[in-house]
Amino acid sequence: MKIVLDAMGGDHGPKVTVQGAVDAVNEYGINIILTGDKNAIEKELNIKNYPKDKIEIIHCSEEISNEDKPVAAIKKKKDSSMVVALNLVKEGKADAIISAGNTGALLAGGLLILGRIKGIDRPALAPTIPTEKGISILIDGGANSDCKPRNYLEFGLMGSVYAMKMLEILKPKVCLVNIGIEEGKGNDSTKAAYEVCKNAPYHFCGNVEARDIPSGYADVIVCDGFTGNVILKLMEGVASTFMKLLKEELTKNTIRKFGAMLLKSGFKGFKKRFDYTEYGGAPFLGVKGLLIKAHGSSNEKAVKNAIRQAKILVEKEVVMEITTEINKLGADTIE
Amino acid sequence: MKIVLDAMGGDHGPKVTVQGAVDAVNEYGINIILTGDKNAIEKELNIKNYPKDKIEIIHCSEEISNEDKPVAAIKKKKDSSMVVALNLVKEGKADAIISAGNTGALLAGGLLILGRIKGIDRPALAPTIPTEKGISILIDGGANSDCKPRNYLEFGLMGSVYAMKMLEILKPKVCLVNIGIEEGKGNDSTKAAYEVCKNAPYHFCGNVEARDIPSGYADVIVCDGFTGNVILKLMEGVASTFMKLLKEELTKNTIRKFGAMLLKSGFKGFKKRFDYTEYGGAPFLGVKGLLIKAHGSSNEKAVKNAIRQAKILVEKEVVMEITTEINKLGADTIE
């Protein structure tokens, strides 16, 4: 198996991506291709220990930044680390691509270079979110702001396949984010989505209210990309505010500081449960090829875990499985 | 000033509403009318100390339950505690109404009985949310699932007036919930809303990402009622999951339990910052009269604070102020 990693992507570039790749090679024994500036990559690689035949560098003269306009960047920067990596997957020279770079460009690249699986109208991002029970899959995490009923149906299907393979849940519980649990609740979009999803060939369990998302009530949480973006970012914001206020309150005097010291490992355990670096990245499901978007602020561990995640999804043939299931569904007959 | 309280509303009925009313009368010296079952109310009232001339009971033979269909309930249950209370405001016999009852019915009642302020297309719920800085106003908290640009414009205006009067902010920062801060980001609905809001006569400060809501970046957070519902319920869910997991981690062994004991007052202070009972209820802004929806699970303190909030909003003539501002805006020329 060969996984290509966009070495220039993410807030920290090769410093972090190369370390993540080396750790993954050492731990999982897979082959990795790094695309990007050869000098910058070699500077990092030369000081690491790893089996030399396991990592290959493909030099690229360009780089897509976070400021670049997505579609224009993909079309113009043909020799960028991201475009070159995507082409390797398209040409069958790599089994999966991982990038922590410009999200919009990566999704545009997925659509323009890899293309959609036949029968899929809208590929979607499927990040994991931490819950009381472990993790749930959110789909769409932000690729499609406005959705038709058919899109929700596809999101549920892709999320269900992904949860089966990645979380090893036999029959994932798929729910639609809505403002009430009863059928008939919602805005125009979710009401229409419910009508289509209720006959889905996967385990559709109706609506889920946002209040029940963190408890882990649903394994797969289906929503449009606007709502998905709000959910992801709000969870992040609430967690950050919570930790800040908690720290403020718990260090107000000496007794509290002493108490907080005794709880240090407890707080660490608590924080770990909300640590996104544990879970890798978010696959862009529905394109012809395995594409994983890693968080822009990924550290070495997050990159390594995204590679582990790619390995699992390649081994379990997630893209093939989605292709098979969408064929069975014949979703293109639904608007 | 006379405030009417639907004594039958909420999960606990007269047991809680009557106590809240008595506390408010004793603390703020205002007059209260309680609508509902006379026997049930008197049973509670008879055992309390308060100036007898300050609380009046109007007996009602009916009650609207949470299972009732909103519009049908308002139309059919003419002698329910909620409908009678709304009519008192309409007839000028009370200055404000508070109910912790069926939200849908209360909003329907607000529209059908009180009616909309001329120029307002869609009244909206404006709950407060706790932030790092204090509190922000969210509007719409769930009354309108699908919104036109004009509605967002009105929400911003009403939220701005409310924040000035209630939070005493001179120039409230009004932001639109969106998936990126740049103009041009969003779904069809928020893109169109931005176009209209950017010329608003209040302090519109562009988009706010959900991540920045808990930090208190915006004083007034504008969104459609679907998104508002997701935000409110998700914050509630994340807070509850957070506290549960924290407790789990911090009581795992004896040392941690001891540490947690030392932090007891710290945790209490922390929890207080997220305590909705401190802030009263959510006004339904844009109707002709002051209507406050209290949380269904309100305790005595929440009821008392909703009464305090009603008192402030009546004194500061919020309804009149919204009427004046919407007239100046001439919003009915915008689609």
Image (cartoon, coloured by chain):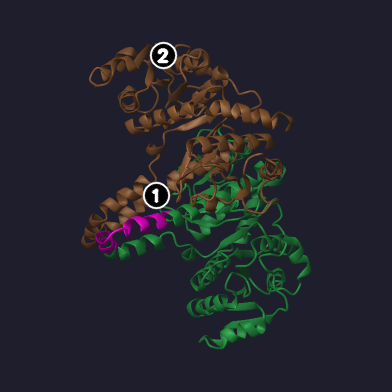
Chain colours: A brown, B green
Say if the magenta span includes residue B193. Answer: no
- Quadrant in which the C terminus of chain A is drawn: top right
Residue for point 38% across, 19% down: A32
- Which x, y percent locates residue A94? 46, 17
Query: What amino acid type should be assigned to the residue bearing mark 2?
Result: Glu
Earlier-in-chain disc, 2 versus 1: 2
Magenta span covers which residues?
Answer: B242-260
The foreground one among B22 and A48 is A48
Measured in 3D between alpha carbons, the distance from the residue under mark 2 to the one under mark 1, in whole angstroms, is: 38 Å
Per the picture, the main secondary structure of the magenta-coloured stretch is: helix
Q: Is residue B272 above or below residue A99?
A: below
Left or right: B309 with respect to A325?
Answer: left
Identify the chain of the residue marked 2, using the numbered disc in the image. A
**Dot 2 lies on which element?**
loop
Q: Residue A278 falls in which quadrant of the image?
A: top left
Residue for point 60% across, 64% down: B292
In the drawing, what numbered circle is on residue A57?
Answer: none
Q: Which residue is label 2 attached to? A: A62
- Which x, y percent locates residue A281? 44, 33
The foreground one among A131 and A99 is A131
The foreground one among A89 and B324 is A89
Q: Which residue is label 1 attached to? A: A241
Can residue A286 be seen here? The reply is no
Is disc 2 in contact with disc 1, using a CB cutoff of under 8 Å? no
Q: Callout 2 environment at 10 Å: few (<14), some (14 to 19), or many (20+)? A: some
Q: Residue A277 falls in which quadrant of the image?
A: top left
Identify the chain of the residue marked 1, using the numbered disc in the image. A
Q: Is residue A303 above or below residue B52?
A: above
Can residue A9 be seen here? The reply is yes
Left or right: B196 with respect to A254?
Answer: right
Query: What amino acid type should be assigned to the residue bearing mark 1?
Result: Thr
